[in-house]
Image: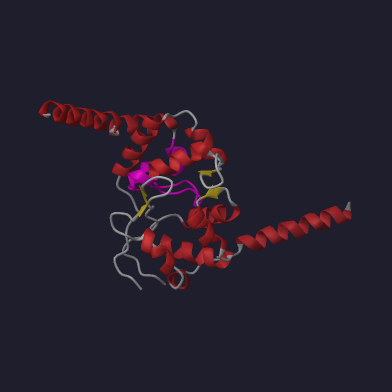
């Protein structure tokens, strides 16, 4: 019983640690070169797979939503080959930094 | 020949009308669907940071995302598996999703394109 409790507390600690990742917008700004060509095009860059649609605007988006989306591409809950490949290359810290960058409101400086 | 061209033009026009999105109908569907319960007032003030802002997002992307939630995992390359959104979109047909996307895209919101590059 003690062992189980110990294991459970270890798992809780691990979860808590994962949530401790804090994003930094300035660090994120160094990482978004790959993202901008699709996600920051006025009028919308168009993806042609599996149908033609405008790639979403993500400046001003909720930070946690961006992190969650990246993780879902990485773990396969969201299926889209381009985003899966990109998300799979990112660490949790990088995801948080990118999310912090994109969450900056319109007209606000990146810092 | 002229007659055929005219017929072709007319049928093209009708096809466009048939698939055109109806913003007003989309508004009704969004209100009835209770989307603001999570996505917040004006679909721009999510009640929790893990929910996205939707207002003003591109119409074609919104439609695409809604369809993906409906598809779940039909192919290895397509679909989104999300318990909440799959449940929300199950009741709608394709035209409904077009209308919903058109309405949400017509709203003003916080999403924007950043002018300066780094």
Q: Taken as a whole, is the magenta stretch helix, strand or loop?
A: loop
Residue B18 or residue B84, whichever sits in front: B18
Please report the bounds of the magenta region as a residue range: B35-61
Identify the colour scheme used: secondary structure
Quarter of the image for residue A22 reads bottom right
- What x and y, as percent, mark residue B1? 12, 29
Which residue is drawn at the image coordinates 16% and 27% (left, top)?
Answer: B4
Q: Residue furthest front?
A: B1
Left or right: B94, with B73 as reference point: left
Residue B38 visible at all: yes
**As displayed, is residue B96 above or below residue A78?**
above
Left or right: B106, with B5 as reference point: right
Residue B75 or residue A92, whichever sits in front: B75
Which residue is drawn at the image coordinates 88% and 55% (left, top)?
Answer: A2
- What x and y, as percent, mark residue B104? 34, 41
Residue A64 visible at all: no
Inspect the magenta stretch and tell me whether residue B42 lies in it. Answer: yes
Which residue is drawn at the image coordinates 42% and 39% (left, top)?
Answer: B36
- What x and y, as percent, mark residue A107? 31, 64
Inspect the magenta stretch and tell me whether residue A37 lies in it. Answer: no
Q: Residue furthest left?
A: B2
**Quadrant including the C terminus of chain A:** bottom left
Quarter of the image for residue A102 reads bottom left
**As displayed, is residue A35 above or below residue B65?**
below
- What x and y, as percent, mark residue A28? 46, 69
């Amino acid at each position: 019983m003690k062992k189980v409790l110990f294991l459970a507390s270890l798992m809780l600690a691990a979860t808590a640690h994962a949530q401790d990742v804090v994003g930094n917008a300035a660090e994120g700004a160094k990482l978004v070169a790959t993202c901008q060509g699709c996600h920051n095009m006025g009028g919308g860059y168009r993806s042609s797979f599996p149908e033609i649609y405008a790639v979403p605007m993500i400046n001003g988006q909720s930070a946690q939503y961006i992190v969650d989306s990246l993780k879902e591409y990485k773990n396969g809950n969201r299926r889209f080959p381009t985003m899966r490949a990109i998300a799979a290359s990112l660490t949790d810290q990088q995801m948080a930094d990118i999310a912090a960058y994109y969450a900056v409101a319109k007209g606000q400086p990146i810092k | 020949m002229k007659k055929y061209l005219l017929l072709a033009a007319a049928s093209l026009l009708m096809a466009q009308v048939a698939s055109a999105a109806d913003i007003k109908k989309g508004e009704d569907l969004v209100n009835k669907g209770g989307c603001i319960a999570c996505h917040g007032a004006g679909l721009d003030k999510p009640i929790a940071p893990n929910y996205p802002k939707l207002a003003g997002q591109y119409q074609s992307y919104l439609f695409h995302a809604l369809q993906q939630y409906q598809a779940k995992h039909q192919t290895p390359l397509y679909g989104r598996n999300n318990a909440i959104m799959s449940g929300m979109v199950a009741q709608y047909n394709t035209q409904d999703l077009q209308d919903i996307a058109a309405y949400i895209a017509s709203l003003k919101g916080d999403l924007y394109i950043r002018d300066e590059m780094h």
